[in-house]
Image (cartoon, rainbow, N blue to C red):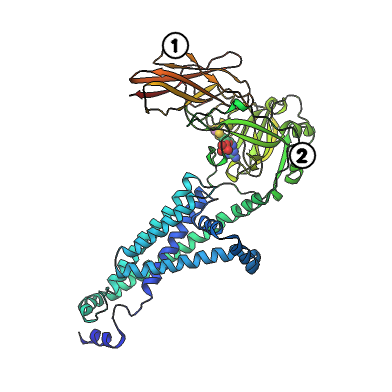
Amino acid sequence: MSTPVRNTMKTGRPADGPRLWAPAAGLVAGAAGIAAGELTAGLLSPLVSPVTALGGAVIDAVPPGVKDVAVQLFGTADKVVLVASIVLVAGFLAALAGILERRRPGLGLALAGLAGVAGLTAVVTRAQTSPQAALAPIVAAAVTMVLLRMLIRRLDTWLPRVAGSTHSADTTAAGQGRGQAPLARRSFLNAMTGTALAAVVGGTVTAIFTRATAVAAGFRSSLKLPAPATPPQTVPAGASLSLPGISALVTPNADFYRIDTALTVPAIDPPAWKLKVTGMVEREVQLDFAELLAKPMTERHITIACVSNNVGGDLIGNALWLGWPVRELLAMAGPKAGADMVLSTSNDGWTASTPLEALTDDRDALLVVGMNGEPLPLEHGFPVRMIVPGLYGFVSATKWLTELKVTRFADDTGYWTTRGWSDHGPIKTQSRIDVPRNGRTVQAGKVQFGGVAWAQHRGVERVEVRVNRGPWQKAQLAGAISTDTWYQWQIGIDLTAGDHKVQVRATDASGQPQTEDKAPVAPDGATGYHTISVKVA
Ligand SMILES: Nc1nc2c(c(=O)[nH]1)N[C@H]1C(S)=C(S)[C@@H](COP(=O)(O)O)O[C@H]1N2
Ligand SMILES: [Mo]
């Protein structure tokens, strides 16, 4: 019993001999947490990770004067300096969390939680953010907290904590701890090694993952889109109705639905990109990115939709696409007689079968490089994708496009067709009620209903609404940008108190109304009327 007491007198508290273990535990826990968060972001939202979001937030917050000084001081290394500073601050906070957690269980966790909230705030306020991007800072904070708690608990077992600064009070506890010291020590050190290893492995995998994305993102942000060579498409003044809650006529990139089979967003450097036209052609043609950008571009609003869009669903969006008509490229190659399909291939191997005719007729099937005035976002197919008016995405909208093979439906099959979906995919006439939302309670009197309707490349002639299967009432149909886009519609209907079922249907320009028969999304698109319930109070 005398040894620990003597130690106490000589060197201070026995428990804090290796004072550095607590901050070290904080550091490895924080590193592993950040690695987990960055890896999550690498998988789900490569454009917005907690670290890059915090960096972006710092850049935005710094006054221009300071920015100039930083650029002058560090030159092009300014970003490296910024990331290094973030790592330093994070390291300091993690070490501090270790110390605090050792002092008082929960205190270090609170600090880690606060850092997580800061990361979350940075992530959700970035322009390129997405709902799934919010997961990364949450994962980072949660992993840090769990590991920190675990490590400090083991440290406490090995070297029991000392309350306050009085030495004698803890002698007994320290003595007890020393009884199990070798075991407890090994348990702590093993956990430290394991955590540090996880952090290194996670960090390395993330770095490999995100490097290519960062390069592609860099090319994208420095890309200057060519101006369209054809006159801009006019948007009629009446195309946008001023009904609160109705879908925007043009969907912002950040809100545009995303559907693909890519676990990670393919990262392509434009200088390395090539598009090949192969198969049943007079001559194979190759096009690189610079050549494509030099072609006369067309800019068109086109509403694309996913075949998996349920009636009333939101897997549909309207954007302004900038691109070169596919028919021009196919004309260079010269499709041979007998060909009836173009199998387009993505950089990641995904394929779509598009009727040759849809790519050679006068519709605006485009090799797209721009979306709503910006270079194509990475997740929407950067640097080049295909957009074809009137066809579901699975048979036309190939992202990260690399090859067009002119072929025959009899000889080749697209990715989803081999999995039970149709080989052709014209978009079915559909309509959707945006306001009021399903299940809402509204005031008795005139209730405003509104939404969107589409029959791409055919056009919508009429939209009607009915209440409780009563007579169809004609809605006001907004002017269209073109038949290739959706239309907004609106109608005011007098409703009395009670529960009401409200339905909408569209009729295309050929006079064909959409069918009431319900069909599932597979194999070629859902049918039926979008039906909502409203409670009138
Ligand atoms: N390379 C590739 N392109 C693809 C897909 C895919 O899985 N991989 N999915 C298609 C489907 S099913 C649809 S609906 C559209 C969606 O395009 P978006 O994500 O830009 O909205 O992309 C199409 N292009
Ligand atoms: Mo789709």
Q: Position of residue 382 (x, y in %)?
A: 63, 44
Ligand 2 under 8 Å from disc 1 Cβ: no
Dot 1 alpha-carbon crowd within 10 angstroms: few under 14, some 14 to 19, many 20 or more: few
User: On screen, 502 above or below 263?
Assistant: above
At a point 42% along the width and 66% down the height, the residue shown is 93
Viewer-closest of 168 and 301: 301
Q: Indicate the quadrant where residue 323 lies.
A: top right
Name the residue at the top extreme.
471
Q: Position of residue 164 (x, y in %)?
A: 26, 75
**Disc 1 secondary structure class:** loop
Q: Indicate the quadrant where residue 62 lies.
A: bottom right
| Mark in front: 2 vs 1 | 1
| Badge 2 vs badge 1, beta-carbon distance below 8 Å | no
Q: Position of residue 383 (x, y in %)?
A: 66, 44
Q: Is residue 471 left or right of residue 236?
A: left
Viewer-closest of 20 and 229: 229
Inter-mark Cα distance, 2 to 1: 52 Å
**Disc 2 secondary structure class:** loop
Name the residue that disc number 1 marks: 471
Dot 2 alpha-carbon crowd within 10 angstroms: few under 14, some 14 to 19, many 20 or more: some
Please indicate, yes or no, whether residue 170 appears anywhere in the rendered image.
yes
Q: Which mark is residue 295?
A: 2
Q: How many marks?
A: 2
